[in-house]
Amino acid sequence: QVHLVESGGGSVQAGGSLRLSCAASERTFSMYSVGWFRQAPGKEREFVASISWGGGTTYYADSVKGRFTISRDNAKNSMYLQMYSLKPEDTAVYYCAADWNNQGTMNYWGEGTLVTVSS
């Protein structure tokens, strides 16, 4: 079991930046691939970015590639999502998650943090 807590959400104008953080309370966090997902109002949850357990491999959704950067610090049991050039369509609840499963989703989820981008 991994308990995840997101922070860093808020309101920002288009073109601005935010940095989301995800803290895990278990050292086993470092054993898992982890990632960020988001769910906009009225839409299904979607993949944003993921990073391998060692941090050497990252993946991004096309919609955020070049604007968002995922990183992790296993010594701090933490993961981050640096977001630049934010757009109104980035408005969503952002969730951190850990441990890919066979269904293409993750086994452990945080409660989410809201990001609102105004035009």
Image: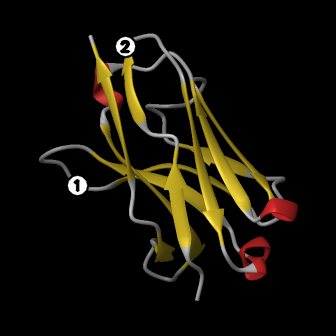
Of mark 2 and mark 1, the one earlier in the sequence is 2
The residue located at (22%, 55%) in the rendering is 44
Based on the displayed image, in which of its 4 quarters is residue 3 positioned?
A: bottom right
The residue located at (56%, 21%) in the rendering is 84
Amino acid type indicated by mark 2: Gln
Q: Which mark is residue 13?
A: 2
In this image, 4 relative to 113: left or right? right
Q: Is residue 32 above or below residue 7?
A: below
Q: Which mark is residue 44?
A: 1
Q: Is residue 76 above or below residue 72?
A: below
Amino acid type indicated by mark 1: Glu
Q: Would you call the spot at circle 1 few (<14 residues within 10 Å), some (14-19), or many (20 or more)?
A: few
Mark 2 → mark 1, Cα distance in angstroms: 24 Å
Dot 2 falls on a residue whose secondary structure is strand
* Front one among 76 and 88: 76
In percent of width and height, residue 7 lies at 52, 49
